[in-house]
Image (cartoon, rainbow, N blue to C red):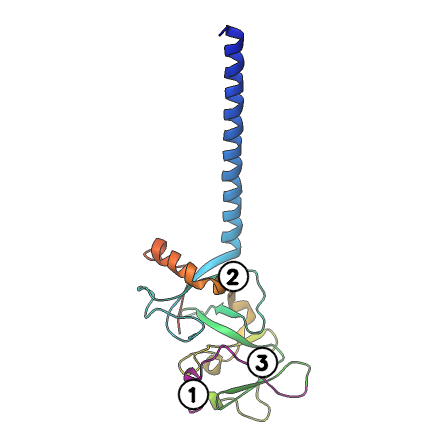
């Protein structure tokens, strides 16, 4: 092979190598950008205790396995039926379900929930397919707390939250409505749908790493 052809092959080899390196660099940059976007938009939540059963299962404590692992959207605006994490000043955050928004009124009679939406005149039954009968005993004293003619009025800028396991949940029935500004994030539908997958990944890869949030009773 003459020197001219040898030089040509070297140039072609360098060109292919440069293309491969540029593609790899581009992939790394894209992955880093996606990671930054993900981290700024979502955060993980490890569920502790049983206040959201049967929808979510919590560990006995934040230091042991057994709880569901999900992702929160920090930018989503909470609405009816969403599962959210609410921050508290002097205690662990709570993970609960959005029951009512500002302007609504609520009645809870023997485990049955009624709501009068803001701007309407009548209470209507709230369908709650996520509840299990054994977790919502009519005998539970907390279930009749707001059974008055006018119900409990949720002020504007606040949100009323309850756990799906009404028998044990510590929520707005005792703590009253929370400021919307205290809602840290909304559980994403995709992580809720695939919670078993994310829980297994969390347990396998990072259970010994402190969780972003440990949401309790």
Q: Residue furthest top?
A: 2
Q: Position of residue 200 (x, y in %)?
A: 38, 59
Q: Image point 53% across, 17% down: which residue? A: 11
Tally the numbered discs: 3
The image quarter in which residue 149 lies: bottom right
Q: Secondary structure at mark 2?
A: helix
Q: Position of residue 163 (x, y in %)?
A: 46, 77
Mark 1 / mark 3, whichever is N-terminal? 1
Tag in front: 3 or 2? 2
- Label disc, if present, on residue 190 of the rendered structure: 2
The image quarter in which residue 140 lies: bottom left
Q: CA distance from mark 1 to mark 3?
A: 24 Å
Q: CA distance from mark 2 to mark 1?
A: 31 Å
The magenta span reads 121-139
Quarter of the picture holding the C terminus: bottom left
Q: Which residue, given by chain and number where applicable, does mark 1 sit on?
A: 137
Tag in front: 1 or 3? 1
Mark 3 / mark 2, whichever is N-terminal? 3
Q: Which residue, given by chain and number where applicable, does mark 3 sit on?
A: 154
Q: CA distance from mark 3 to mark 2?
A: 29 Å
Q: Check contact, mark 2 vs mark 1: CB within 8 A.
A: no
Q: Position of residue 47 (x, y in %)?
A: 40, 67
Neighbor class of circle 2 (other Cα within 10 Å; few <14, some 14-19, many 20+) is few
């Amino acid at each position: 092979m003459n020197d001219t052809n040898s030089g040509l092959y070297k140039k072609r080899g360098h060109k292919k190598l440069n293309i491969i390196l540029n593609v790899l660099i581009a992939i790394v940059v894209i992955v880093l950008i996606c990671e930054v976007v993900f981290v700024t938009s979502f955060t993980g939540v490890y569920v502790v205790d049983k206040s959201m059963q049967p929808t979510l299962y919590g560990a006995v404590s934040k230091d042991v396995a057994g709880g569901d692992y999900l992702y929160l959207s920090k930018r989503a605006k909470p609405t009816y039926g969403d599962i959210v994490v609410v921050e508290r000043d002097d205690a662990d955050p709570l993970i609960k379900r959005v029951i009512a928004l500002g302007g609504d009124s609520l009645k809870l009679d023997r485990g049955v929930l009624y709501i009068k939406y803001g701007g309407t005149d009548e209470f209507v039954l709230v369908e709650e397919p996520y509840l299990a009968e054994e977790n919502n005993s009519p005998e539970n004293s907390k279930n009749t707390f707001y059974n008055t003619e006018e119900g409990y009025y949720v002020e504007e800028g606040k949100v009323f939250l309850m756990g799906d396991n009404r028998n044990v949940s510590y929520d707005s029935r005792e703590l009253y409505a929370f400021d919307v500004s205290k809602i840290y994030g909304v559980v994403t539908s995709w992580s809720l749908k695939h919670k078993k997958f994310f829980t297994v990944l969390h347990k396998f890869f990072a259970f010994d790493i402190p969780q972003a949030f440990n949401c309790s009773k």
